[in-house]
Amino acid sequence: MFKQVTIIGTGLLGGSFARDLREHQLAEKIVGVCRSKETAELALSSRVVDVVLPAKEAVIGADLIVLATPMQAMLPLLNELDGSISASAILTDVGSVKTDLYNQLKQHAPQFLNQFVLAHPIAGGESSGVSASKVGLFKDKHVILTPTSEVNEVAVQAIQTLWQQLGARVRSMSLQEHDAIFAKTSHLPHVIAFSLVNFLSKQADKERLFDLAAAGFYDFTRIASSDAEMWRDICITNRDQVLLALDGFQEQLSTIRQHVADTDQDKILGYFGEAKSARDTGLLKKAEALAKE
């Protein structure tokens, strides 16, 4: 059990993490740092945290500090808190990009590298804010750790054990592998969803289009309701990998566009069939296997 956990950013992920800590009795005291008075009041009234404090006060005495802010806010925040964070405290995050954060730490805040365990819980949703947080968000979800050569192994083990106690499936991989994988499987789909909604919203008959859209459209574009600031930061901090993913997807769009332009029924059928087979033998079987565990 941690004596004091300070969570900077009590939104969906930070708030859910706090709720799980309380549910599993893994922290004696949970301190929150909130961006607004309204968020602070809700976090306190719903017992997400025990107390809300300004960041510099909140980290004093903490043996675990969790950064649950947009990616580009993390380094400025750490520089602001330098001198207030105990050298024995463990630092971790819930961000979706790892290489950029590590490089920023190495260049501008190397003093934190030995105590910072880079982590990414693969959980969330289109809703944001403390009101969207809930107990059990991370149960049976993957949490990726990307330990670096500088970080203390004791800290890594502590974070791994903590996530496992919350019911998560913990895996480790390199910074580069992490960013390449999630650029394709998470960052790209969000960009596509945002783009599709923007495309339709700019049509002259947009109200009619949205009114007549079927359930599949709402399922596909659900993630376009995600926090815009967070996804802006992900695209900026994982720029190279997101661009590679976009280029690869553009090639696929060009391929199917050509098949349609050529009225090539066999190639269209083959293209769609290949995708169906890949999904049925990959994603669906994986989902079924996880459900049986």
Image (tube, helix red, strand yellow):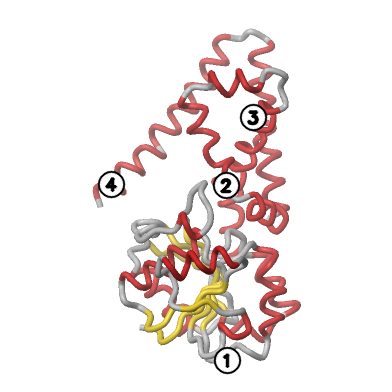
For the residues labelled 3 and 2, the Cα–Cα distance comes to 25 Å
**Are the residues at dot 2 and dot 4 in contact (C-beta closer than 8 Å)?**
no
How far across and down, in percent of the image, does residue 2 sit? 40, 84
Within 10 Å of the Cα at label 3, are there few (<14), some (14-19), or many (20+) other Cα atoms?
A: few
Question: What element does badge 3 sit on?
Answer: helix
The structure residue drawn at horizontal position 38% and vertical position 35%, both measured from the top left corner, is: 281
Within 10 Å of the Cα at label 2, are there few (<14), some (14-19), or many (20+) other Cα atoms?
A: some
Q: Nearer the viewer, mark 4 or mark 1?
A: 1
Instruction: Give amino acid for label 2.
Output: Ser
> Residue under circle 1?
87
Within 10 Å of the Cα at label 1, are there few (<14), some (14-19), or many (20+) other Cα atoms?
A: few
Question: What element does badge 4 sit on?
Answer: helix
- Of 198 and 113, the residue lying toward us: 198
**The N terminus sits in image quarter:** bottom left
For the residues labelled 4 and 3, the Cα–Cα distance comes to 31 Å
Residue 291's mark? 4
For the residues labelled 2 and 4, the Cα–Cα distance comes to 26 Å
Q: Earlier in the sequence, mark 4 or mark 1?
A: 1
Instruction: Give amino acid for label 4.
Output: Ala
> Residue under circle 2?
226
> Residue under circle 3?
252
Residue 60 occupies which quadrant of the picture?
bottom right
Instruction: Give amino acid for label 3.
Output: Gln
Q: Is residue 204 above or below residue 175?
A: above
Instruction: Give amino acid for label 1.
Output: Ala
The structure residue drawn at horizontal position 37% and vertical position 62%, both measured from the top left corner, is: 168
